[in-house]
Amino acid sequence: GDETMLVVTSGVARLDNRKFKDRMGGKPRMLGAEEVLAVTSHPPGGVCPFGLPAPLPIYCDLSLEPFDEVVPAAGATNAAVRIAPRRMADLVGAIWVDVCQ
């Protein structure tokens, strides 16, 4: 079935459909702008893994690992936060996956 989830990746990483399907059991589908806003309360480009209005499964892709710090959006397209990838994953209860090229 369809499950809405948040996958946090490096900004230069591209989702690998085969890896995603093998790991998650289905094909990925990007949400439309209105769906993103309804589910996360943030606009596309501003989606933050912190402070979501309702719990979502959150996954961090291994493409984040090489970085000492990452800069995820913080609720708006012009807001961000600096954080170590492992710390971010720990704070949001993310599961590490390998779903990017």
Image (cartoon, rainbow, N blue to C red):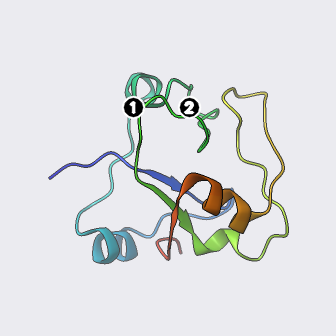
> Dividing the picture into quarters, in which one does residue 19 lie?
bottom left
7 left or right, relative to 45: left
Q: Does dot 2 land on a helix, a strand or a loop?
A: loop
The spot of residue 85 in percent (x, y) is 72, 64
Relative to 72, say whether 69 is above or below.
Answer: below
The spot of residue 2 in percent (x, y) is 20, 49
Q: Earlier in the sequence, mark 2 or mark 1?
A: 1
The residue shown at (71%, 47%) is 72
Q: Does dot 1 land on a helix, a strand or a loop?
A: loop
Cα distance between the residues tagged 2 and 1? 9 Å
Badge 2 amino acid: Pro
The residue shown at (61%, 41%) is 50
> Dividing the picture into quarters, in which one does residue 33 lie?
top left
Badge 1 amino acid: Gly
> Circle 2: is it few (<14), some (14-19), or many (20+) Cα within 10 Å?
some
Q: Which residue is identified by label 2?
A: 44
- The numbered dot on residue 66 is none
The residue shown at (40%, 29%) is 39
58 left or right, relative to 78: left
The residue shown at (37%, 68%) is 17
Does the residue at mark 2 contact the one at mark 1 (Cβ under 8 Å)?
no
Relative to 46, say whether 1 is above or below.
Answer: below
Q: Which residue is identified by label 1?
A: 32
Q: Nearer the viewer, residue 85 or 34?
A: 85
Total marks placed? 2
30 left or right, relative to 88: left
> Dividing the picture into quarters, in which one does residue 11 lie?
bottom right
> Circle 1: is it few (<14), some (14-19), or many (20+) Cα within 10 Å?
few
Q: Which of 29 and 73 is in front in this view?
A: 73
Q: Which residue lies furthest to the left in this view?
A: 1
The spot of residue 6 in percent (x, y) is 46, 49
Relative to 77, say whether 13 is above or below.
Answer: below
